[in-house]
Every structure is written in C-alpha cells, then in structure tokens.
C-alpha cells in the first residue's frame, strides 16, 4: 500500500485526499495538470482515463486507485481489478455503483478490494445509518437521511453538473433536526445513492435521503426545481449552461455541513466545515485501512466498523453525535 493514483485528483475532493496521504507515494492525475495548483508531497501526471492505453500506462506500479471523477468508472475499475489493484470510489451516482457492484466476483478472484460509497453522502451517511439501524429497537423502521450542505463552498464543474441533473428529480420533502446552529430544517428528496443501496446492505425496509442547503433562500429555490415546468427547463442546453455558470459564480451561504440519520427514536449526526474536505479525508482514511479489508466489492458500511471509523474521522476537525435520542 505505497503507490496511490488519484484520478480527478485536482478537484476539491482529490486535493483533500492527496493531502491526507502524503506519507504514501501519491500520484495526482487528470487531463490538464498544467492548469492545476501543485499539491506538495505528490507527483503530477497527465492521464486521460477515457484512453485505455493512457490508463494502462498510469496504472503501472500502482497499488490503489482513488476515483474522484465520473469518467468511465466501471471500465477504470475493471482495468484495476484485472491487475489486482484496489479501487476506491466516492461517486454518489446509483447507476454507476450498480455497475461497479457487478465486479465483485472478478475482484475476489484477483484479491482486489472495490470500496464503494466512500465520502460524505454517501459514506458517512451510510455509517450513521448502520449505527441507527443496529441501535433501533425496531427492525421495520425506515431510515431517514438528511444532508445539509454549505451553499457557499466552491465546487468543481462535475459536481455542479451532477447537482443540477438531480434538481429535476426531487420527490417529496420532510423535516430533519440537524445539530446547532442549524436546527430543524425541511429537506427535499435528492437522488443520492445511499437511499437505494442501504436497504440491501443493512436489511432495512426502506430509506430516503433529503437535501437542503445552509441558505434557506437557496433551498427554497432548489425545491422549485421539482415542479414539472422548471424541470423541463433544466434539460434545455442553454438554460443548463447558464445555470451551471451561475452556480459556479454564486457563493450564497457558508461552508458548513451536517448529515443526520434517523431510525425510529435513534438519531446520529456528523457535522463540520467543508464537505469536500470530509469526503476527501474519509476516502484517505479508508485507503489507509485497505490492507485489512476483504477482496471483492463492498460499500463502506460493509467494510469498516462505523463508530471506530467515524471517531477517527471526527478527529480531523469534525464532530460526531451518537447519543441523540428523540423524545
């Protein structure tokens, strides 16, 4: 576990992971390294992951790949598995995760671990969900997941595009209580992958994940995207391009975040500043644990003990609340 290749390593999440892994030989890769700020203690490499020959060159001598982009993820993971290379993915896209799960048997044969749902949402939320499910007195309770993200934090184009694509699919809303200073907030259902995978990995009847932003004004604007007329507008290329530019330029709100999971009367939360930092640090922590993890494809809640992992992650400057009982 000495050579780590981070694809999409120049983005906010990749940079955070690279910074946390400088005790290893970290190769930060992307298509345009000359445009990125250097990351101390790492090696830069130009890699076009869509080019099989370029990818094969980049994988030579690598032990682990951390995927921080959505560029042919399944094909990249398959190339890793064929070489016995561990693969870690932070994607929140359920269709991509479904494809990656199908590499379980090949990964077992090659002794490679495919770690999925590694980040904040999904990732930390999956671990909180496992804690709540195990502590709940009823096995029939639905998991309710709330993600409050900072609308003032800068995000890359890919993350903004994924968010925009999800705005037109919102269905339903409900209230979640977040740690202070946020309190009770209305969240709107958003297509984060955790709600689709957790019923299978934890054996719970169902799960729902809702999103809100620290800015109440921006959250209200976000909720309007679920209206059919607005959703249709979001699919028009010119409107989409305009909104992506606006989202990239506007930073209304702060950089705080909080995620909360509830199952019956049990609730657990994780919060702090800069969700990209939380995602990158969670991925780095998982990579440091890879030598002890089983081969095959698994989601983070299937690979690590949740309280121990989250306690160690919280030591990076975040807060973990596990004893919050509903009255």
Image: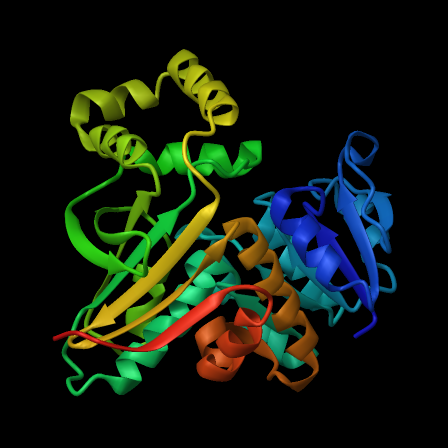
- Image: 73 above or below 270: above
Residue sitting at x 62%, y 44%? 12
- Give the camera-side residue of 306 and 292: 306
- In the rendered structure, the answer to whether residue 166 lies left or right of residue 67 reads left
> In which quarter of the view is residue 286 placed?
bottom right
Q: Is residue 144 visible?
A: yes
The residue that appears at 34% across and 53% down in the rendered structure is 147
Q: Is residue 191 left or right of residue 26?
A: left
Quadrant of residue 217 in the image? top left
Residue 95: x and y in percent read 42, 51
In front here: 300 or 111? 300
Q: Which residue is farthest top?
A: 238
In the rendered image, the quadrant that contains the C terminus is bottom left
Q: Quadrant of residue 184?
A: bottom left
Task: Decide if residue 64 is on the left or right side of residue 251.
Answer: right
Q: Is residue 201 visible?
A: no
Residue 87: percent from left, percent from top? 65, 65
Name the colouring of the figure.
rainbow
Residue 74: x and y, percent? 57, 54
Residue at 17% x, 28% y: name it: 227
The total number of labels drawn is 0
Residue at 73% in and 56% down: 18
User: Could you tell whether 24 is left or right of 155 in the image?
Assistant: right
Which image quadrant: the N terminus? bottom right
């Amino acid at each position: 576990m000495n050579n780590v290749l981070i694809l999409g390593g120049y983005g906010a999440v990749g940079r955070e992971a690279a910074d946390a892994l400088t005790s290893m030989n970290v190769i930060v890769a992307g298509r345009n390294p000359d445009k990125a700020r250097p990351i101390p203690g790492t090696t830069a490499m130009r890699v076009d992951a869509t080019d099989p020959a370029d990818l094969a060159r980049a994988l030579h001598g690598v032990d682990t790949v951390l995927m921080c982009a959505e560029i042919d993820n399944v094909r990249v993971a398959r190339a890793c598995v064929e070489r016995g290379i561990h693969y870690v993915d932070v994607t929140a896209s359920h269709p991509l995760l479904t494809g990656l799960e199908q590499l379980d048997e090949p990964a077992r044969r090659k002794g490679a671990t495919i770690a999925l749902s590694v980040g904040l949402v999904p990732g930390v939320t999956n671990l909180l969900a496992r804690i709540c499910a195990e502590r709940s007195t009823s096995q029939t309770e639905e998991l309710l997941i709330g993600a409050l993200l900072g609308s003032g934090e800068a995000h890359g184009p890919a993350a903004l595009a994924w968010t925009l694509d999800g705005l037109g699919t919102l269905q339903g809303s409900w209230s979640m209580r977040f740690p202070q200073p946020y309190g009770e907030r209305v969240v709107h259902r958003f297509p984060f992958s955790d709600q689709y995978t957790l019923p299978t990995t934890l054996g719970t009847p169902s799960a729902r994940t809702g999103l809100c932003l620290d800015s109440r004004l921006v959250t209200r604007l976000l909720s309007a995207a679920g209206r059919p007329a607005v959703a249709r507008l979001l699919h028009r290329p010119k409107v989409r391009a305009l909104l992506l530019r606006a989202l990239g330029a506007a930073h209304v709100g702060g950089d705080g975040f909080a995620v909360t999971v509830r199952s019956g009367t049990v609730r657990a939360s994780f919060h702090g500043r800069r969700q990209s930092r939380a995602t990158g640090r969670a991925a780095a922590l998982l990579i440091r644990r890879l030598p002890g993890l089983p081969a095959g494809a698994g989601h983070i809640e299937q690979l690590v003990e949740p309280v121990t992992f989250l306690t160690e992650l919280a030591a990076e400057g975040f807060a973990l609340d596990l004893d919050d009982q509903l009255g």
